């Protein structure tokens, strides 16, 4: 599950983490956009639920210096030895440039360089290296983790997917349908032992299809008009189905862009229906080769009306029986 859950204060997440564990969820993965940072929700989970695995999906490679990123990852790996995975990625110009006042230059090379730095630093090595996009002078962690965390790479198109396959411990996919998974995985080639594929999956567990599709269209026009995601979906073969959306968006017609997204695309990218139906659709990702399907729970009318009680009822319906947990 993606954490923290919206509408629940961080201080109240102890009950959420316990409910997720009871429902058979194995992992909690954070995100980092404009809500919480990536590490604080996981630090709380590390203290409150010793069985849950933890992961960042993702920590941007531009918004922290390489040394600070290594320190944050090492601290969480020390707090939860063997349970933490660090997911990194380029993020987007909006988040890096517009919200953090940093330059978004050469995202592929910056990501590759940060990945190489982190692999060395988290092993406890002294790093003294001139990379293509930055230089590090004799950095060494004072508290290198006894169990270095795996480093996963967020990837969309072939170049980054191949980099993940060659140099990372896993890959993180985002904004793709279950039927798209084989296309992405084909770029990885034969996976090394222990290489993990994690995928964030947007889930809106309501049988109000009109509500879910309206919300889905809003999310799709907000994300898939970003150049990297637009290029990703063109590569996946959605030029014909999403072309009208991109055309309307480029013309400044936000309402027209949302209206141009076909139901079939919304239904493939934003799972909706009963919780049990959503859970069954998530399993399609696992069947396609995803090792860690990470649900991102979207707001629903039922959750808005029922509050904490509705959430407590929902979580077990999205999970698996504890006896089935592996």
Image: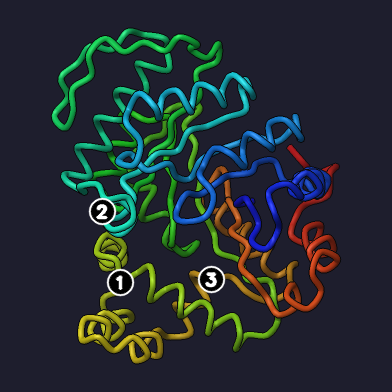
Q: Residue at x 27, y 37 (%)?
A: 111
Place of residue 161 in the rendered image (x, y in percent of width and height, measured from the top left): 31, 44
Give the image location of residue 205, x and y in percent.
68, 71
Hey, which quadrant is residue 84 in on the image?
Answer: top right
Q: Nearer the viewer, residue 161 or 182?
A: 161
According to the picture, the residue beneath numbered tag 1 turns out to be 225
Q: Point out which mark residue 270 bears.
A: 3
Q: Residue at left 61%, top 22%?
A: 82
Mark 2 or mark 3: which comes first in sequence? 2
Mark sitting earlier along the chain (3/1): 1
Within 10 Å of disc 1 (Cα), the crowding (few <14, some 14-19, many 20+) is some
Report the mark closest to the observer, 2 or 3: 2
Q: Residue at x 24, y 30 (%)?
A: 113
Spatial separation of the CA atoms under disc 2 and disc 3: 28 Å
Quadrant in which the C terminus is drawn: top right
Residue tagged 2: 97
Determine the CA span between mark 2 and mark 1: 17 Å
* Depicted 105 relative to depicted 310: above or below: above
Q: Name the side, left or right, on which 313 lies relative to 282.
A: right
N-terminal of the two: label 2 or label 1? Answer: 2
Q: How many marks?
A: 3
């Amino acid at each position: 599950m993606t954490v923290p859950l919206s509408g629940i204060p961080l201080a109240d997440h102890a009950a959420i983490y316990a409910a997720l564990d009871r429902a058979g969820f194995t992992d909690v993965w954070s995100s980092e956009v404009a809500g919480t940072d990536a590490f604080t929700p996981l630090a709380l989970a590390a203290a409150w639920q010793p069985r849950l695995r933890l992961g960042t999906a993702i920590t941007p490679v531009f918004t922290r210096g390489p040394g600070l990123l290594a320190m944050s990852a090492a601290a969480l790996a020390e707090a939860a030895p063997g349970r933490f995975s660090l997911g990194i990625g380029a993020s987007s110009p909006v988040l890096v440039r517009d919200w953090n006042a940093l330059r978004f230059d050469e995202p592929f090379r910056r990501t590759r360089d940060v990945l190489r730095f982190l692999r060395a630093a988290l092993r406890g090595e002294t790093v003294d290296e001139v990379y293509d996009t930055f230089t590090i002078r004799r950095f060494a962690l004072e508290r290198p983790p006894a169990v270095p965390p795996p480093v996963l790479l967020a990837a969309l198109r072939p170049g980054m997917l191949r980099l993940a396959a060659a140099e990372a411990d896993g890959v993180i996919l985002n904004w793709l349908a279950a039927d798209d998974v084989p296309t992405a995985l084909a770029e990885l080639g034969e996976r090394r032992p222990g290489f993990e594929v994690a995928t964030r999956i947007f889930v809106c567990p309501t049988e109000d299809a009109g509500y879910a599709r309206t919300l889905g269209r809003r999310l799709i026009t907000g994300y898939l008009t970003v150049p990297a995601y637009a290029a990703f979906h063109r590569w996946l073969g959605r030029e014909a189905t999403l072309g009208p959306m991109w055309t309307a968006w480029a013309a400044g017609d936000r309402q027209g862009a949302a209206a141009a997204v076909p139901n079939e695309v919304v239904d493939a990218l934003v799972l909706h229906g009963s919780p049990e139906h959503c859970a069954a659709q998530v399993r399609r990702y696992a069947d396609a080769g995803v090792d860690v399907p990470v649900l991102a729970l979207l707001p629903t009318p039922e959750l808005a009306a029922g509050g904490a009680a509705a959430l407590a009822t929902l979580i077990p319906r999205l999970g698996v029986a504890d006896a089935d947990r592996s």
